[in-house]
Image: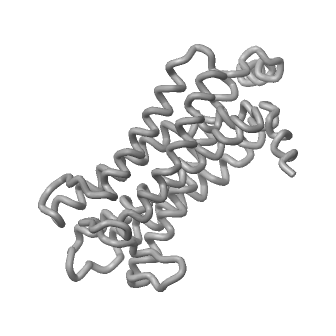
Amino acid sequence: MWKWLHSYADPERAYKLSGTLLPWFSILAILLVGTGSIWGLLFAPTDYQQGDSYRIIFIHVPAASMSMAAYMGMATASFIGLVWQIKSADWAAAAIAPIGAVITFIALLTGAAWGKPMWGTWWVWDARLTSELVLLFLYLGVISLYASFEDKVLAARAAGILAIVGVINIPIIKYSVDWWSSLHQPSTIKITEKSTMSSDMLYPLLINIVGFGMMIGAITLVRYRTEILARNGMRPWVRELATAEEAK
């Protein structure tokens, strides 16, 4: 059933496939993030309670959503690397980790900027905020483990185990506002119920969420291709690629 995964274990094939996908992800990211941000920041109506300060939601919510999505992608790649011993999956996890850490930091920073006028303080040890901070520490832990071992196989194994164990934090982040009394507002985007946001605010937010996903995908592909080249520098196809680039 999972034999199709092994076809992408070949570094050259994975490098070429990621190169084919990169322009599509990049173009979609630019179009979607540009459209969603301009619509949300400039043309969406002012909130009757929060005024214009709510507009940070068009950056904060996509960043927070994608911080969890990126972590799930990293944990999935780590699981594939551990179970099926596919090195390219470990390289994908290593590529995602720094991107996830940055997007999580952006989510925390924009959340603090939003919380200051709403709560009167930059930070509270709220369940949602604290679990998101734990997510940042998990990303930093994975990055540290990848950098701590000279043996990259051992490094990938240690980082992969941490990434997989850390998945338990994702539902805590997602449902913390429902499970505990929280200063953080409840989820406004619902799948099974009608959203509490008006459509002229909701649509640019959804566009930006997808756009942030495309942006993270594009940056991940760039880093993934770099990881492949770094780990396969002595392969003939890499040497041929380098020679072709020098000849241009």
The front one of 131 and 243 is: 131
Residue drawn at (72%, 17%), measured in percent from left and top? Answer: 233
Residue drawn at (49%, 84%), measured in percent from left and top? Answer: 193
Q: What x and y, as percent, mark residue 231?
A: 68, 22
* Residue 219 appearing in the image: yes
Residue drawn at (33%, 70%), measured in percent from left and top? Answer: 42
Q: What x and y, as percent, mark residue 159?
A: 55, 31
Residue 57 sits in which quadrant?
bottom left
Against 125, is 152 above or below? above
Against 46, is 127 above or below? above
Going by the image, does 8 lie left or right of 106? right
Report the number of discs: 0
The front one of 203 and 184 is: 184
Against 58, is 90 above or below? above
Residue 141 sits in which quadrant?
top left
Going by the image, does 132 lie left or right of 208? left
* Residue 67 appearing in the image: no
Q: What x and y, as percent, mark residue 225?
A: 66, 33
Q: Quadrant of the C terminus?
A: top right
**Residue furthest left in the image:** 120
Instruction: Report the coloring of the rendering.
Output: one colour
The front one of 113 and 71 is: 71
Against 123, is 80 above or below? above
Residue drawn at (45%, 67%), measured in percent from left and top? Answer: 36
